[in-house]
Amino acid sequence: MSYRAQARFVLSNSKEVIAQVCTHLLEHDAEIEDIDDGKIVRFQGSSAHISCREIETKIDVTAPTVEGLYFMRLTLASHIRELTTDDDLDILLNGDGYELGQPPNFRVLDVVAAKDITPHMRRLTLAGDVQRYDPLAALHVNLILPHPEVQGPQWPQVGTDGLIVWPNPDKRPFRRKYTVRSVNMAAGTIDIDFVLHDDAGPGSQFARQAKPGDQVGMIGPGGGGLVEAGWYLFAGDETALPAIARMLEHLPAEAQGKAIIEVASDAEMQPIHTALPFH
């Protein structure tokens, strides 16, 4: 089964913009095929047929999943808007996924526990739909932290052009990247560790004040994860510790290597449970 979406819009410098979009996507491992009336873009399992005729641009997207369709729509629409000089550009997408509501990679999780595991490291346990965060291929998520001056829902919506729309654009919630420290599928929870900085930013401030019943948005997972190798080297400070610890705990039985983790003091040291011959 495949999913499809289409867009038709007027773009004054269509061929130039689409060429720039394709050049950028090539740097991110996309495959670009030149055809008579435009381009075919293959990216992360999805494809888009982009045709440019005079000032009309047509995009037909095909993907194996609704989430893949969403990402291809988002990728193309965001880059086209970034590169065009047309202030009144109106990209209206039709087809599957037209009424997505919220992004398919977005979840709302509830804080169920908060505790300090060292003087400057605080762990929040979040509950909800956590299955997508269990694989080790991608460890990072973007937390959507509520803006303190906004009451009511602050979560992202998908616009008709495939781009993100915020309920209060002038006071958007804060977005910060963190690592999922661990996942408990049986309990439906994940742990995320926060370094508590003295000059607290939005992430540290949220973690310091969080209590059961609070909510946090989460987009992901994404970024690098654990790859197969015979020998590993891990190095980082406290901010990298959650990612390093999670990978060390899930290494294949035959793995060997070295882990170097810098912490501020002995009080910031944490036990890492691995039976592997690491130094």
Image (cartoon, rainbow, N blue to C red):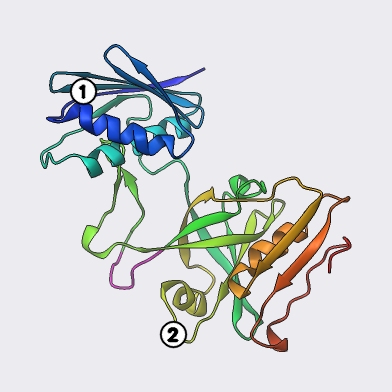
Front position in the image: 265 or 176: 265
Q: Residue at the spot x=36%, y=39% of the render?
A: 24
Residue 274 colored in magenta in the image: no
Residue 49's place in the image compared with 185, above or below, is: above
Q: Quadrant of the C terminus?
A: bottom right
> Which of the two discs, 1 and 2, labels the residue nearer the N terminus?
1
Q: Main secondary structure of the magenta part?
A: loop
In this figure, which residue is indicated by the disc labeled 1?
57
Amino acid type, label 1: Thr
Q: Nearer the viewer, mark 1 or mark 2?
A: 1
Residue 84's place in the image compared with 247, above or below, is: above
Residue 214's place in the image compared with 251, above or below, is: below
- Residue 49, given in percent of the width and then of the height, sits at 35, 19
Front position in the image: 218 or 76: 76
Q: Is residue 262 visible?
A: yes
Question: Image quadrant of residue 57?
Answer: top left
Q: CA distance from mark 1 to mark 2?
A: 48 Å
Identify the secondary structure beneath mark 1: strand
Left or right of 15? Residue 96 is right
Part of the protein shown in magenta: 145-151
Amino acid type, label 2: Asp
- Residue 117, given in percent of the width and then of the height, sits at 67, 79
In this figure, which residue is indicated by the disc labeled 2?
199
